[in-house]
Image: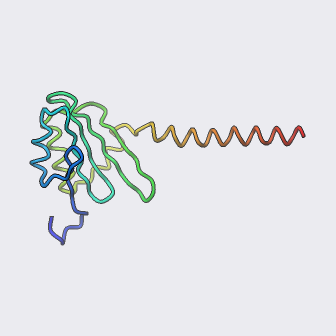
Amino acid sequence: MNSDSPFPPVTWDLSGDPCETKEKALSAIKNDTEAFIICSRGDDFLQAVCNSPENYHCEISFADGKNRELYMAPEDLNYSQLRDLFSRYAAGEDLSHLKGEWTLDVDKTNYYTSVIVGLLIVGIVVFIFFYNS
């Protein structure tokens, strides 16, 4: 991308190592169940792993300040769909509509809910302890 681009620079990562181009990253993951790719734009990223030939699990992350949301595709993509999605993302297309179509990673959501519930329980126990004293 040129320096006049309104989008953050795009970087590619293939199985933990920097990759020069989208073409190299996508061709390397094709039918390689050991490979994963990440395309980063600023603090956001799109990532995929090959589950089996022509079967790719994808996730997209949106950062908003200190908050990060990770969304998982509801079903695996084929290679053509994977190429299209990564091409659109790398070109700067706004994919925020996926927040409504993909599934929010519940592990992160459950973590915060567990912390809040835990603090609430501790607060109730402390209140009962001091109330009965």
Q: Which residue reaches farthest right?
A: 133
- Which quarter of the image is occupied by the N terminus? bottom left
* Position in image of residue 79 (x %, y %): 14, 35
Q: Which residue reaches farthest top?
A: 52
Q: Which residue reaches farthest bottom?
A: 4
* Position in image of residue 114 (x %, y %): 57, 38
How was this image coloured?
A: rainbow
* Position in image of residue 20 (x %, y %): 13, 55
Q: Is residue 8 above or below residue 120?
A: below
| Total numbered circles | 0
Residue 112 left/right relative to 65: right
- Which quarter of the image is occupied by the C terminus? top right
Q: Is residue 74 above or below residue 95?
A: above
Quadrant assignment, res 42: bottom left
Residue 71 left/right relative to 4: right
The residue located at (35%, 41%) in the rendering is 71
* Position in image of residue 112 (x %, y %): 53, 43
The residue located at (12%, 36%) in the rendering is 30
The residue located at (22%, 40%) in the rendering is 36
Quadrant assignment, res 80: top left
Residue 132 left/right relative to 126: right
